[in-house]
Amino acid sequence: MRAPTPRTDAQAAGSATPRRPRTSGLRLLGPAFVAAVAYVDPGNVAANVSAGSQFGFLLIWVLVAANAMAVIVQYLSAKVGIVTGKSLPELVGERLGRRARLAYWSQAELIAVATDLAEVIGGAIALNLLFGVPLVVGGAITGVISMALLVLQQRRRQRHFEFVITAMLIILTVGFTAGLFVAPPDWGAAATGLVPGLAGPDSVLLAASMLGATVMPHVIYLHSSLARDRHGRGHDQPTITRLLRATRWDVVGALVLAGGVNISMLLLAASTLQGQAVEDSIEGAHAAIAGALGPVVATLFAVGLLASGLASTSVGAYAGAEIMQGLLRVRVPLMLRRVVTLLPALILLSTDLSPTLMLVLSQVVLSFGIPFALIPLVQLTRSTELMGPRRNGPVLQVAAVVIVAAIVTLNVALLVLTFWPR
């Protein structure tokens, strides 16, 4: 490891002079809502519906714990971008030699491709459910629409990009929660799910999947970039204080919304699908919802899945570009990245493999990348040299270390249970 090469703010940005932030009101909110899309992607849909249909309300506590962890992790990522004026990939790249940087980028790039695979598959499944579009065509349509969304970011219109992604977050929220208004759950029974508990190896596997794969590595990298680009660089301490206060509200608000959506999906499955012969796939869950609650609710569920796939694949492609720029100091056109990372998903969709199985396996691949993002984040945010007076305090640092240990342990359990089944 060698000392970081000094770089100017303009070099770090790869563009124009940094701008000063607007430090009041709702204008400061937005980056966390883009990051929150990763918490309600198609992988989460599959896990939450499976948990509810198989175990009822038992695993609600897992989602509550996962959301609490996510709030801390995403706040730390945003804090790095605000305080240092650099993204997490930039900071990691500055502290690694060339070979180590290339190796680190390789795993991060694999994670970016696996992320995109899951999101494109989710969008393709949704288009198939809504309009009968073949999966390969649906994947291509998902990719094209995501390209259109990325044009907003590519043209430095981040606020517009945030607005569109947040609108999709609202759409998927409506789609995934509509069923609860048609068939409200037994709230007393649901409350029992807040007490930690498991029911055999299958519930352990699902809990590990839900908790371990909730904090997506690509969005840990990305949130630091979103905060940096949104608020600029070179702030004085009073401005940083205001930005960090607003960021806490941004993160809590966005992840409470995302967590509520995830819990709603589990509640819907637990109250309407438990005990039914539900095929182990998103398509099977959709059919079961249609049978239990009617075609309108099933259509809204599919619309939510489509919004989830479109928003999350756009965010994933953006994250991949930021990772490459930060680690390799190379800026590849975002549209070119979109095409390259789209190809593996289209190839796999053209095979006879189950789309839901591919989605689940992509989540297993993502679990390998979580420690590579989380451990450097915790190390950097505790550094007095880097963060100055904004370094993690004792309570926050202990919480961060516990979260890293818990997520890494659960991901190891997930991998063991996946590759060495009972």
Image (cartoon, helix red, strand yellow):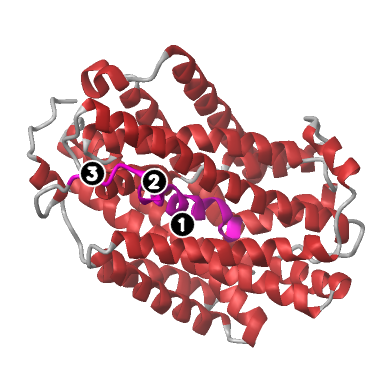
Q: CA distance from mark 3 to mark 2?
A: 41 Å
Q: Position of residue 227 (x, y in %)?
A: 32, 44
Q: Residues within 10 Å of mark 1 (few under 14, many from 20)?
A: many
Disc 3 designates what residue?
Answer: 102
Q: Give the camera-side residue of 178 and 364.
A: 178
Q: Is residue 334 left or right of residue 27?
A: left
Labels 1 and 2: the sequence-earlier one = 2
Judging by the rendered image, the residue that carries numbered circle 2 is 25
The type of residue carrying mark 3 is: Leu
Q: CA distance from mark 1 to mark 2?
A: 33 Å
Compared with residue 9, is residue 262 higher up or lower down, i.e. above or below? Answer: below
Disc 2 on helix, strand or loop? helix
Q: Is residue 397 left or right of residue 58?
A: left
Magenta residues, start to end:
20-43
Quadrant of residue 381 within the rendered picture: top left
Of badges 1 and 3, nearer the viewer stands 1
- Amino acid at pointer 1: Thr
282 or 299: nearer the eye?
299
Name the residue carrying label 1.
115
Report, in whole angstroms, how far the alpha carbon at label 1 lies from the one at label 3. Answer: 20 Å
Relative image position of residue 368 (x, y in whole percent): 48, 41
The image shows residue 137, relative to residue 90, as above or below, that is below
Q: Earlier in the sequence, mark 3 or mark 2?
A: 2
Residue 222 % position (x, y): 35, 48
Residue at left offset 44%, top offset 12%: 394
- Magenta span main SS: helix
Q: Is residue 15 visible?
A: yes
* Among the 4 quarters of the image, the one containing residue 388: top left
